[in-house]
Image (tube, rainbow, N blue to C red):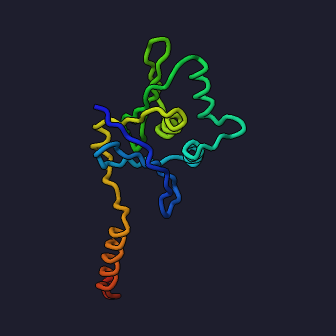
Amino acid sequence: MLVQIELQGVRLEVPSQSPIMMLQEVGEGERVLPIYIGAPEASAIHYATEGIVPERPLTHDLLVNVVRGLGAEFSKIVITEVRDHTYYAELHFSFAGSEIVISSRPSDAVAVAIRTDTPIYASEDLLKEVSRSPVASSAESEEEILDDFREFINSISPEDFEG
């Protein structure tokens, strides 16, 4: 079964400064699928989400132009699985009455999806395996986290760190 997801954003993990693409379940679901991506792919996704059109086409723009130039249309993007810490995705497009499926990296697939307004899906099995609940982002919950941290700091002493 496929579950529709959408790009929530690309963030930098602290302290490594590695980009992480955050995909969130659409609708009432709250699962988030975080996937580490490369800096060039993060830039390509950023360009697309911000509507930045480069003077010359980037690789993802070129792919979209070629597919459309051949008369095909993207129908969906599917994040299918993770194997050995590597995520896999598929580009689905229609051409001459046939459905064509091409293997892809998730970051490239999402970069294409953002450019073409193509729906993004993940397999239910993948979401069950690796998704996370979103971190609460309200000011109140941030304050609660800070209060808990202050309480922890106030409860420790130097002796707690002696071997």
Q: Residue at left 34%, top 44%? A: 25
Q: Is residue 123 left or right of residue 108?
A: left
Q: Residue 145 occupies which quadrant of the picture?
A: bottom left
Q: Residue at left 31%, top 48%? A: 31
Q: Residue at left 37%, top 46%? A: 24
Viewer-side residue, 14 vs 67: 67
- Picture coordinates of residue 84, whole percent (x, y): 39, 42
- Picture coordinates of residue 14, whole percent (x, y): 48, 62
Looking at the image, the residue that sits furthest to the right is 55
Q: How many marks?
A: 0
Decide if residue 163 is in sight here: no
- Picture coordinates of residue 81, whole percent (x, y): 36, 36
Looking at the image, the residue that sits furthest to the top is 96
Q: Residue 67 occupies which quadrant of the picture?
A: top right
Q: Which quadrant holds the C terminus?
A: bottom left
Viewer-side residue, 28 vs 60: 28
Q: Residue 4 occupies which quadrant of the picture?
A: top left
Q: Is residue 63 left or right of residue 98?
A: right
Decide if residue 41 is in sight here: yes
Viewer-side residue, 88 vs 107: 107
Q: Is residue 119 left or right of residue 145?
A: right
Q: Which quadrant holds the N terminus?
A: top left
Does 134 appear above or below 159? above
Q: Is residue 33 left or right of residue 9?
A: left
